[in-house]
Amino acid sequence: MALRKFLLLFIVLILIGCNQSDSDSKAPADDNTGTGVKQSQSSMNENTSVVDTETEREGKVVARVNGHPIYEDSLYGRNLEYVINEEILYQIGIRQGLDKQYRAKARNFGKNLIIQGIKTSIYENAEPTKEISGEEIKNYYESNKDKYTYARIQEISFPDSSLGSEIKDKIKSGEELQTIANSYPDIPITVKDIGYNRAMVEHFTAIEVGSVSEVIKKPDGTFSVLKIVETKDVPFNVSKNSIKYGLEAKRRAQMVDSYIRKAVEENNMTIEIIEQESNKEKNQ
């Protein structure tokens, strides 16, 4: 049944091709008439040329679709009928100009492959280096302890920024956030336990219990102050593998950076940075 469908589709394609050929032969020779039709036909020929004129290579041909060969070594274990159907869809896509639509994506993909190939070559041809030692990993962990410390944060929110300094002073004096909120019965002040939140840590100069943030303006127009009420360290044994991978990545980045500087010099490459217009200038 599937083969019958394929044969019917194949016959339709042949008929389309015949009709196209007939149209070409009947087209007027005068350049001043039928311009739009000629341009369309030219575009069709351009789209199909990739398929129709492909040079055959060595290898056993097991089928042809519109003259395009399908090789035995390109089946990769797939059913021949499946590969033929894929080829038909590919050729129809070319006729419809989809190759132009996806050309930029394919070019970017190829560009990324080339870049990755160069980087791989840099790593493989680099001078042998010592393996990152346990001592290096430990030193990094101790020097960047904040990265491996989680903080549980509470937030007190209020509607007027003028209350900020007063509330901060009360927090620093040791008052509980809920007690502070209760001391303003006529003002809608709320307290929330945010939990362990890495994103909020940026509002603190030190990650330690009792640290208080500056007054923060929230997206909804209200204000808040944050307080760290508990901290938890990620154990070294849990972090050491990720630290090692990070240090190795940094080392590879340095290799690439060194290679780029040398390549620019040896190839007399020029780099021109063109400043973009500021948003203010664009809006004027």
Image: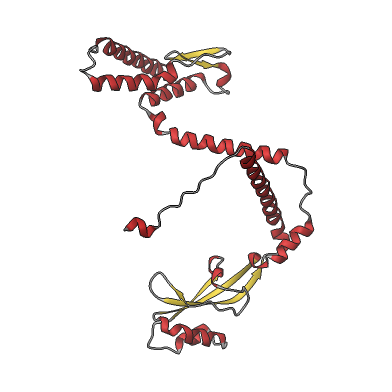
- Residue drawn at (62%, 78%) of the image: 209
Q: Is residue 192 above or below residue 274?
A: below
Is 163 on the left-hand or right-hand side of 110?
left
Tell how many labels: 0
Q: Relative to 205, say whether 44 is above or below.
A: above
Q: Could you say which is closer to the camera, residue 284 or residue 224?
A: 284
Q: Please provide percent x and percent y for residue 98.
A: 39, 30
Q: Position of residue 167 (x, y in %)?
A: 48, 85
Q: Is residue 204 left or right of residue 220?
A: right
* Res. 1 visible in picture: no
- Above or below residue 17? Residue 175 is below
Q: Residue furthest left?
A: 33
- Please tell me whether residue 163 is drawn above or below residue 150 in the rendered image: below
Q: Nearer the viewer, residue 51 or 255?
A: 255
Name the quadrant of the C terminus.
bottom left
Q: Percent position (x, y) of residue 147?
A: 64, 64
- Residue 213 shows in this picture: yes
Q: How is the image coloured?
A: secondary structure
Residue 12 sits in quarter: top left
Q: Quadrant of the rendered structure where residue 261 is?
A: top right
**Residue drawn at the location 33% of the way across and 23% of the way down:** 43
Position of residue 262 measured from the top left corner of the image (x, y, whole percent) = 66, 42
Residue at 71% x, 38% y is 124
**Where the N terminus falls, by quadrant?**
top left
